[in-house]
Amino acid sequence: MEKTIPQKARQKTKAILEVRDLNVAFKTARGKAKILEGVNFELFPKEILALVGETGSGKSVTAKSILNLFGNYPGQIQGQVWFDTQDLLTLKDAQLESIRGNRISMVFQNPQSSINPLFTLGEQISRLIRLYLVPEIKMARQENNLTEKQAVIHIARQKLNEVGLTDIDRLLKSYAGEISGGMAQRYRIALALLSSPEILIADEATSALDVTVQAHILKLMKALCQKKQTAILFITHDLGIAAQICDRVAVMYAGRIVEVAKTKSLFENPLHPYTRGLLKAVPKFGKKEDLSFVPGMIPDLVHPPKGCRFHTRCSQAMTICRREKPRRVAAESRHDVSCFLYELEK
Amino acid sequence: MLLFLFKRFAGLIALLVVLSTLVFFFTRSLPGDVAALYVGGTAKAEEIERARVELGLDKPLIVQYKCYIQKLLQGDMGISLRTHRPVMQDLMEKIPMSMELVCWALLFAASGGVLLGVTAAYHQGSLLDEVIKWFTSAAVSIPIFFFALLLQLFFFNVLGWFPLQGRLDTFLEFSNPIENITGFSLVDTIITGNFAAFFNVAWHMVLPVAALTIGPLGIIARLTRSALLDVMQQDYILAARASGISEWVLFFYYGLRNALSPVLTVIGLSVALILLSTFYVEMIFNWPGIGYYALAAIMSLDYTALMGVSLMIGTVYVMANTLMDIVRRIVDPRIK
Amino acid sequence: MELQAESYEQMAKQVVKEHRQVKWFLLGQLLKRKAAMLSLIILVLTVTAALFAPWVAPYPDQGMGAVNISQRLSPPSNEHLLGTDIYGRDMLSRVICGARISIFGGMFIVVTAAFIGVPLGLWAGYNEGKSGAVIIKVVELFLSFPATLIAMAITILFGAGWSTALIALVIPWWPWYTRLVQGEVLSIKQMLYVEAARMLGYGKIYIIFRHLLPNVITPVIVMILLDLGPAIIAIGLLSFLGLGTQPPMADWGLMVWEGAQNILSEWWIAIVPGCAMFIVVTAFNIFGDALKDILTPGRSSG
Amino acid sequence: MVHRLIKFMFFAFIPFLLAANVWAAEKNMVFASPYGVTTLDPSVSYSTELGYMANIYETLIRVNPPGSSDLFSYLLATGYSASADGLEYTFTLRKGVKFHDGTNFNAQAVKFSIERTKKLGKGAGFIWADLKEIQVIDDYTVKFVLNIPVPLPQIAASAYASYIMSPGVKDKDSAWFNKGNDAGTGPYMLKNYKDGESWMLAKFEQYWGGWDGKHVENILVKYTKDPLTQLQMLQADQAMLVGRIPLDSYPSVKKGKNTKVLYGPSYQNYMAFFNTTRPPLDNVKVRKALAHAIPYDDIITIGFNGMASQARGPVPQGQFGGTEDVIQHKYDLELAKKLLAEAGHKGGGFKLSLSYAAENAQEARFAPLIQSEFKKIGVEVEIKALAWNTQWSMAKEDPKKAQDIFLLLWWPTYSDPYETLFSLLHDEGKKPVWNLAYYRNAAYDDMIRKAYETIGSNPQKALQLYVDAQNLVQNDVPVAWVVDIVANWPMNKKLQGLVMNPAYPNVPFFYEMHLE
């Protein structure tokens, strides 16, 4: 992934993470796909921010861009991701590696497939404990008079216990294929929160789980993060979940954030036509369904629509929508929206 | 594991039985009199009859078959119609010669192929990747016999760097003959301290081994690259990256380890390819191994020898695949 | 699960339609791949030349085997662009006529193999009962033995010749298609619309042809394309040992063998057909690879 | 890196390359031979191993090459005399001859050897069919008693089945020989025998001829099938003598700095049998037409690089019985067309199958020429390259299913033409061994038998009978005699003294050779 970063001074804010003008494009066989176009948002300490949108709206890419997880996948990434005082996109791999998993952690959608199938769970957690919890190992050795190996196992037990896993001895010897999805996600959360990071990015962390398990995991995640004072960027396509646990919600459509607001404000008073469509489509009984009930499909990002990317599906589209891109405006206090309906109002 | 081994072994036996049965009935249903072939020359009728009795061809087919299987179980594959020696003895003499080529070729193809594949995957999309892609595409597309001829033309005729053919310069066969201990000439020459012959054999082996290596090398490199890229797109690699594992460890430890299983499978399959290629390479480079023997058997319709060669190749092939399966089981806990 | 017949129909149609649309759309991508396009051009030219060999070849009768002793062993020149062989036959004409035998032979092998292998694979994949198990056992038996060796054995037993060689190669070749199709079917079978069709009581044959076949067509076509190169080489391998094509008909493998004796002096006799084989096989492989990337993304290419 | 490695390897090999020259400069040489070994049993041997057998074993007498003043030279016998009726031959034997196993050569050994060969009845053992008994007169005199007056000296000088071996092998079978053992009296012993790979013909110290003067002493035989390889070994000085090089490379070898080609007479010839049991080849005019349509000159150019001549009849020119009085069918397409029309096949219009031995490079080369030429008279030919054994059993088994045209390379077992004429053309009924034309002509059979029986007493009459018999055949055209070949040995210029003897095809008599 190429990075092109204009060096701009950062405005002083309270935000722990600030994403500015993030653009991501992938090279595909058909040409350049502009996956993200000018994504802006900020995450405040201890806050839970939901990033919602349909499949393909760029939520996950946004999450991955924050830690630049694309490896050598062919594509371009532009913009700024301010964490603390550093722009993560300017960092070298080695520097990034000291942040990844340590200060910013991530949990992914498919818990089982995110665990390497060739190593036991014990091997994998031990590796991270050795990487991040050196003082703790030392302490455990001194306190309990253990060898290093025993100390690592000791810590692993504690950490797995913390996420509510039982029968840990067996678990440590198991492989990914041998445990249930719920257990796997608890394990992943344990790994992610091992070093008490400042930010946890949960990328559809509960989408692949059964509804009951989902609720447990959500609860656990929220509780643990409160305890460790970790902010969560919660990525989901499920508005219901967003409403349940999040402080604020950002709605994404086709690589842009179209609306950001306090949860209550957004649900009570959705401004963007797309958000309105989504809310109308929320199924009543917490059923898991894709949010494809706004008529039409997500546009082809190799040849995205000119102007506002939503105009092809928007019932209130105007001529200007086809020509120009809307800017983000604060329609109400702490309620931003990118839509000409409101831009023109002002 | 034991059960698995037992199953594979039973499968091997079953395969060999089916194979030998097929081969047996095929050869018996052929035009041409096996006894006459055995006697050769201007044989008289009574002489052919004598050979018929000698070879047991006068008995009913079923009895012959029973006899054949019984002998086979004792490792007796019959008498070659061409050399008039026990096929088993012939094979035992020729196998080491070929195995020497096959082992080196396999070693180079596997190590080189993995190396090329890893390099290409690591530099995915770069010029290097592109070059390797072209090279491996060419490697899998070039017919072995044509490549062998090209090697001879270029390295012998144009550059004069390597000998045209053979295993040992003829004068060394007289002055420094190779003592036959293991049958592997490189090993034998080292054991006996016969360095003149050692270097000479090594020098002669370069071109045939190169010819045998090229195809499997391309296949293994292509598969390694795609398997690695496939692995590198897996969720667990992403998760590991997100948890701060360094890119280097990610690629060379996790990536390779996870891509190993398909690579091992294809290495196992390459054994068959290399074995078959020895037919051509040994013919073109005049290397007195199993391929050369098989070819002579084809030319003179030496059915017993052909049967022996087929059974042997079948066995080696199945054994190589079984071995690779065992290794895969060791490296991959998913296969149960 | 409750499903209305219409909604199932719709679902099925939708899936198939989307597949097709997407694929034909993706074919346009080929134009952007230079190597694949170059290969395609080479292939089109070669196949056309092979088809119209009697009109394209400068000396068509020599291409078919007529001798021309006065011109024997002449190096490449204006009169004979690629030189002549030991009988004085124009190499260019020989290679063009040889293309017919090599390329069409290769096509015959893979297409026939597919015609045998695909139905068996559909059946074995859909019917996991006894008949399916038997098919799979047979396939495994074939696959546990090197294909070229089987073909060699067959040609030895039934006599060398072009047609024997082709049939001898089809015999170990079809199981690969059966295995591919069976695997595909096993995964498609789990899809909702197939299950739905089954529940609605549609017959086996109907489901196989209506739903399974259209979905395995793409991987089969890709495999056919990828197999063409190896098939051409396989014919050459047999011919090189004298087990395949018989003179005066000659495929490229036999021509290489014929020229092998003269390689150190009249090199063109072996090098010309060898290069032809190499170039065409490479072109088939590159084109097949590209098509595979485009049509069946996400499968590792081996 | 690679470059350095190669450099290293180069230097590492220089001493050994030098060693090669040292070794070769002495009385040792390498013979890259395409001639494989079927069996090493001297009683059974009837194939390409002849080249080695004739150096390991000896016969009583040897036929001299054409043009010599004497018909025979004497090896284990010092002379012979025949009775007036031609039924008894008495040989006096050489004294002081030792076998390789140390036993002394004597009359008992002769009796043992010939009787062993006759009793085994394998290979060319049939040549002794008319031998009644062998009487040992004393240690060094032996008498052969015959049933009918056949040319015994020629038989005793046969290239096959007439070798004398040590009585020490009394209880040994062919397998013992095939392990690489020998029991001859010849100048060389077989050593380091590796079947299908290499073996050594090593000087036998106690050879009766002695080792004074210039002789090659050790010959490493490197079994090398590939002509190209042999060419390279020859050009790289790795082999002094080779058997077969690519046909088109003869001009360059003749001109080579270190290489030359020695040409000499040969009794080998190529022929095409017509399957006379089936239409259209049961019609003599069709056969004659085809014989006139064979492009003899082109075959000589392409198949033999000019080193052959059109055959006249079954017996090659130069051999006894091969004279210019035998009718020759010349290449003449117009005549061929006319004959076809006369036979009721105007413009051809039929299809024939032709088979040749896939192992035979010459046949592979010229078979397409016949096909190409026959096409011009409207006859389609389907060529089948088959393994020699296959094509032979196909031709023998059932004439109705056999191929129409069968190409064969033939050479006589001993120098009298009877064997050729008898084997190839006498009536063998439905199960022939060599009469693959299924030719039946009682007059012919009588004529050659008569000639065979009179040759001992009246060679002139026998010759006339042989010629007449051949002309009888030439009128029936059961076989088209294609070419008589010219034998050749590509060799290093240093190698001197090789004498080509058509009675012993492809035998290099090493004892007569030396290196300069």
Image (cartoon, coloured by chain):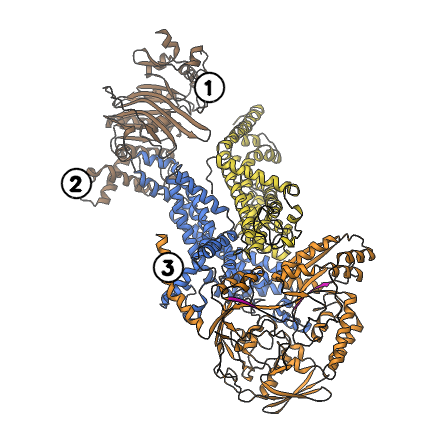
Label at residue D23: none
Q: Quickly name the residue at label 1.
A: A293
Q: Secondary structure at mark 2?
A: helix
Q: Residues within 10 Å of mark 1 (few under 14, many from 20)?
A: some
Q: Quickly name the residue at label 3.
A: D9
Q: Position of residue A145 (x, y in %)?
A: 17, 44
- Chain D's colour is orange
- Chain C's colour is yellow
Q: Main secondary structure of the magenta part?
A: strand
Disc 2 versus disc 1: distance between alpha carbons? 58 Å
Disc 2 versus disc 3: distance between alpha carbons? 64 Å
Q: Which residues are magenta?
A: D259-274
- Chain B's colour is blue
* Sequence-first disc among 2 and 1: 2
Give left or right: position of C206 versus B6: right
Q: Position of residue D151 (x, y in %)?
A: 69, 81
* 2 vs 3, front mark: 3
The residue under label 1 is which amino acid type? Phe
Residue C212 drawn above or below residue D51: above
Res. D70 visible in picture: yes
Quadrant hosting residue D432:
bottom right
Marks 2 and 3 close (CB-CB < 8 Å)? no
Marks 1 and 3 close (CB-CB < 8 Å)? no
Q: Position of residue C128 (x, y in %)?
A: 55, 41
Q: Secondary structure at mark 1?
A: loop
The residue under label 2 is which amino acid type? Glu
Q: Which chain is brown?
A: A
Q: Residues within 10 Å of mark 2 (few under 14, many from 20)?
A: few
Disc 1 versus disc 3: distance between alpha carbons? 74 Å
Q: Quickly name the residue at label 2.
A: A143
**Magenta region includes residue C73:** no
Q: Secondary structure at mark 3?
A: helix
